[in-house]
Amino acid sequence: MSFEAKRIRADLVLCYKIVHGHVDIDKNELFRLATASFTQGNDLKIVKKHSVVNARAFHFSNHVINHSNSLN
């Protein structure tokens, strides 16, 4: 397994733990869960927050969203 794959896997595990309340981090500060019907059966789709600066664009919460939403 490459280093990048290991990092993505670790990020996804942490994202899962945050969303399901297994760690003491407020998920509402990092993520916004989609409530619309466009989630196509996945009730845990995460909506990416708009970022103007690169500091936010490369933050953990934005980085992991694409990988998390691609799981189905």
Image: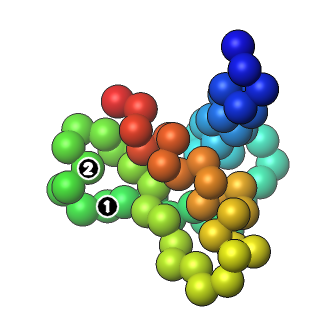
Residue 17 shows in the view: no
Residue 62: assigned label: none
Q: Quarter holding the C terminus?
A: top left
Disc 2, disc 1: CB below 8 Å? no
Q: For the residues marked 2 and 1, what is the alpha-carbon distance in whole angstroms?
A: 8 Å
Q: Is residue 57 positioned above or below 65 on the image?
A: below
Q: Residue at x 64, y 42 (%)?
A: 15
Q: Quadrant of the N terminus?
A: top right
Q: Secondary structure at mark 1?
A: loop
Q: Position of residue 55 (x, y in %)?
A: 75, 74
**Which label sits in the foreground, 2 or 1?**
2
Q: Determine whether 39 is above or below 28 in the image.
A: above
Give the secondary structure at mark 2. Answer: helix
Q: Residue 57, percent across and down?
A: 64, 70
Query: 67 or 33: nearer the eye?
Result: 67
What residue is shown at x 42% (from left), y 44% (from top)?
A: 69
- Determine whether 33 is above or below 8 in the image: below
Q: Residues within 10 Å of mark 1 (few under 14, many from 20)?
A: few
Front in this rendered view, residue 64 or 19: 64
- Mark number, residue 35: 1
Q: Nearer the viewer, residue 6 or 72?
A: 6
Figure check: 24 above or below 26 = above
State the residue lying farthest toward the bottom: 52
Q: Residue under circle 2?
A: 39
* Residue at position x 34%, y 44% in the image: 43
Q: Name the residue at the front extreme.
A: 2
Q: Amino acid at mark 1?
A: Thr
Task: Kindly identify the amino acid type of the residue bearing the numbered disc 2.
Answer: Thr
